[in-house]
Image (tube, rainbow, N blue to C red):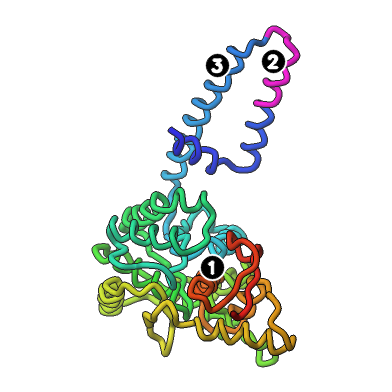
Amino acid sequence: MFNEIKNTINNLDEKELKSLLLQFFLRMQTVEERKGYSEQQFFSDIKNTYNGLLVYKKNQASVEQQTQFHSTHIVFGDSPTGSLKIALKELALNQQEKIITFSDLFSIGSIWNLHDSQGVTNRYEWLSTHINIDDEVLFNYEENFKQTILDIEQIPRHHPNIIWVGENAHEQTGLRFVLYLLKEKINDVFTINTNEAYKTHFDRTEIDFTPLHMGELSSEQLKQIYENEKNGNELTQTERKAFEQQWEQLCENKEVLRIWEINEIMSVPETFYDEYIINTVKKFHQKKNHNDFIKSARIIGEVIGHLNQYVGDQFIEYRVRRLIVDGIFDMEGVPKAMRYYSIKIR
């Protein structure tokens, strides 16, 4: 019951939420002013409003399912999904082309047998015990992840699938995972390589910038890329089979950190960046000529800013906390989030 209520609220848009809240407040005010409107009637009306809302959202979902989308985009991450939605809307394609999103970061965490239920649970357990993630995200993590898998498995057979992927371990791992999920489908599958597209359409010699992942591109850039690339590169059956086999190899590995090197995904120990983190702290100490505490957020930002890999600040923050536990760093503050504590070399 609680999950049903929560999901219903999460699926409301801003206008619907404001209208619902206004109804509640007006009825509460009427009860308090004692204008013949009892608390019992208030409860009854709230219950009827809730039941009516459930019916409305179910009908709305039914109508949306009947919308004749003719293709499906698959994107890895909420930020690039938001930008792509804007791009498709500006191209007048938002009612024709659907987006399925994996709200995750596949360069970190367990991917062991991730295509089955136990693998999803293993990933959830690793994330919940190692990474500082919002409680609400964790609460719905397994359910949302499995729903995304189901959404991919239920893509209509006539839909071409467009997978957006860049030159990083996160999206490349996601690509192989999705192609494994699609292995029984005959749908045409296209990829749009955002790094190659960026070089073709936006690269300037005077600007030293290479996007690490799709989330670093604006909606306007994605719009131009899609206009020019359209369906991108169509994968042959041989290429699809190769990616499926690569996933089968990847998901047998129990390492929780992956990097992208020489066009390959490499599984590396979780300690891979520890020495770099330690040296970054030492450089801060040397610069100031003393070993004062430094905000962990500043250290993490410095490390992330110089990496040519997309592993996310939450993973680097996990390694900072691990180095505190291992006695490498001293800590001041409470490590509930990176902005709440400071570190220094012990």
Q: Which mark is first along the chain, 2 or 3?
A: 2
Which residue, given by chain and number where applicable, does mark 2 sit on?
31
Residue 265, image quadrant: bottom left
* Callout 1 secondary element: helix
Q: What type is the residue that disc 2 sits on?
A: Val
* Residue under the point 69% across and 89% down: 286
The alpha-carbon separation of the residues under discs 3 and 1 comes to 45 Å
Q: What type is the residue that disc 3 sits on?
A: Ser
Predominant SS along the magenta part: helix
Residue 158, image quadrant: bottom left
Q: Position of residue 234 (x, y in %)?
A: 37, 75
Q: What type is the residue that disc 1 sits on?
A: Gln
Which residue, given by chain and number where applicable, does mark 3 sit on?
44
Q: Is residue 95 visible?
A: yes
Q: Which mark is first along the chain, 1 or 3?
A: 3
Numbered mark located on residue 314 in the image: 1
The boundaries of the magenta stretch are 24-36
Q: Nearer the viewer, residue 58 or 344?
A: 344
